[in-house]
Amino acid sequence: MRKIQMVDLQSQYAKIKNVVDPSIQEILESAAFINGPKVHQFQENLENYLGVKHVIPCANGTDALQIAMMGLGLKPGDEVITADFTFAATVEVIALLQLTPVLVDVDPITFNIDVAAIEKAITPKTKAIVPVHLFGLAADMDPIMDLAKKHNLYVIEDNAQGIGASYTHKDGTKTKTGAIGDVASTSFFPSKNLGCYGDGGAIFTNDDDLAHIIRGIVNHGMYKRYHHDVVGVNSRLDSIQAAVLDAKLPHLDSYNQARRNAARKYTEAFKDHPSITTPSGRTTCDGICDTCDCHVFHQYTLNLKDVDRDALVAHLQQHNIPCGVYYPIPLHLQKAYKDERYKEEDFEVTNQLVKSVISLPMHTELDDEQIDFITSTILNFINEN
């Protein structure tokens, strides 16, 4: 059996080496390292893929989220509502801009932000909502957009884990995640579904004026060299990373399909086990349907019941099976983001998930032998304990 990895980028690279290597060599020979033709080519191709008017590449996913908020002109003290159960970057940028983070609980099935909790948290100071498409599952965007319209709020999609997923609207139409809200951000960190070989990110929007502002912000606030029209930052996607991403983009749907196929095999192995809840699509789904496109399985995360999660982690490590706990501490309990406003009873779901979730290896190169070994090792542990 091949070595099991949380993400197998080496095997993935081997399959696209014949495209990646010449593209990088071309950049080395042209020395067009920053804002070169490859960056613009990737930008245009990603716009076409997502069906969004503007893609503005930048240096990383955290910058992308911060720049999106800067572009909206949010002011210190403005409240921004987001999920308590997510990676810290989401709340980090809110705090960095001296905005006021407002953390709310998540849905127990999807792990995505609870729409009822959003509505309860809205105050006259609320200016934006940041839904996270967590683990690759599209958040429930229609009611979120309805809430935003009702209260005149911005919606900033955190699409760092969800690129390639589609959201099915109430009328049956579909939109790619990242193309629904006022603005969106994504990360191209190597382990992402569409990842480069370093750091990278991008901002998406259909708003022409907002896109113009953001293009200035990513480049020191300049639209003309040495003319600084807005307060900006230095955040650019380099040409080599753009070349890698452009080589991968035509494969993104097949990459996501490979993840779904692996997820189905995991789910089949764990089916009907009383101690294991497997991930599915929307709350209306009863599994991973054949046409599933709402979930791209950036992570495959189990929710355990009456299982010593930490002992299971140790057991898997003993058998050379990597795994992850995303996330072990709620954001509202992190030292940097504690606030007396928060009440523990408002985070019932998150407080349970941090004790019971475990994420299994998930990538495009998983094979049946590896999945069988992973699932049997987990089942043997749970059944014997």
Image (cartoon, rainbow, N blue to C red):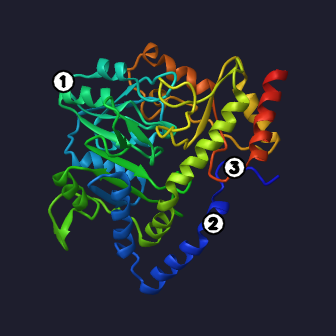
- Upstream in sequence: badge 2 or badge 3: 2
Position of 255 compared to 138: left or right? right
Residue identified by numbered label 3: 366
Please say if 341 is above or below 89: above
Query: For the view shown, which residue lies furthest in the bottom direction?
Result: 29
372 or 189, which is in the foreground? Answer: 372
- Upstream in sequence: badge 2 or badge 1: 2
Residue identified by numbered label 2: 15
Residue at 52% across / 59% down in the picture?
Answer: 251
Residue identified by numbered label 1: 124
Q: Secondary structure at mark 2?
A: helix
Three-letter amino acid code of the residue under disc 3: Leu
Q: What is the spatial separation of the Cα atoms under label 1 and label 3, in whole angstroms? A: 49 Å
245 or 190, which is in the foreground? Answer: 245
231 or 248, which is in the foreground? Answer: 248
Determine if residue 91 is in view. no
Image location of residue 31, percent across then percent down:
42, 83
Three-letter amino acid code of the residue under disc 1: Pro
- Upstream in sequence: badge 1 or badge 3: 1
Q: What is the spatial separation of the Cα atoms under label 2 and label 3, in whole angstroms? A: 14 Å
Residue at 18% across / 73% down in the picture?
Answer: 226
Position of 183 compared to 294: left or right? left
> Quick one: quadrant of the C terminus?
top right
Q: What is the spatial separation of the Cα atoms under label 2 and label 1, in whole angstroms? A: 53 Å
37 or 123, which is in the foreground? Answer: 37
Residue at 38% across / 30% down in the picture?
Answer: 140
Three-letter amino acid code of the residue under disc 2: Lys
Determine if residue 255 is in view. yes
> Neighbour class for label 1 at 10 Å: few (<14), some, many (≥20)?
few
Image location of residue 62, percent across then percent down:
40, 50
Image location of residue 268, percent across then percent down:
69, 31
